Amino acid sequence: MSRRARPGSVGRQNVPRDQWLEIGAECPHCGERVTEEMVYSWRPVPDDPKLLLLWCPDCGDRVEINHV
């Protein structure tokens, strides 16, 4: 059975910045740990991002992480 979610779906999580930098976050689709190395876009800037965009290496889905 495929682990992929429907095409075009985006998993979004709210994660405290300190927690994200220390341990990463979990992909909401497959549970894979996603980390800072997987980020392809920081918005607005890497020094103080509010939104991170990345791809999960396990299921291939896009994940958005909001820093709270």
Image (cartoon, grey):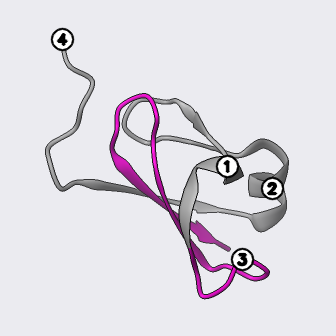
Specify the label residue 21 is tagged with: 2
Q: Which residue is mark 3?
A: 46
In the displayed orientation, state which residue is furthest to the bottom.
44
Q: CA distance from mark 1 to mark 2?
A: 10 Å
**Numbered label tally:** 4
The residue lying at 45 percent from left, 41 percent from top is 56
Q: CA distance from mark 3 to mark 2?
A: 12 Å
Q: Are marks 4 and 2 in contact (CB under 8 Å)?
A: no
Q: Disc 1 on helix, strand or loop?
A: helix
Q: Identify which amino acid the numbered label 3 is placed on.
A: Pro
Q: Which residue is mark 1?
A: 37
Q: Vertical placement of 40 versus 46: above or below?
A: above
Mark 1 surroundings: few (<14), some (14-19) or many (≥20) residues within 10 A: few
Q: Indicate which label's residue lies in the foreground, 4 or 3.
A: 3
Q: Is residue 47 a member of the stretch shown in magenta?
A: yes
Segment tinted magenta in the rendering:
42-68
N-terminal of the pair, mark 4 or mark 2, is 4
Q: CA distance from mark 4 to mark 3?
A: 37 Å
Query: Dividing the image into 4 quarters, which one contains the C terminus?
Result: bottom right
N-terminal of the pair, mark 1 or mark 3, is 1
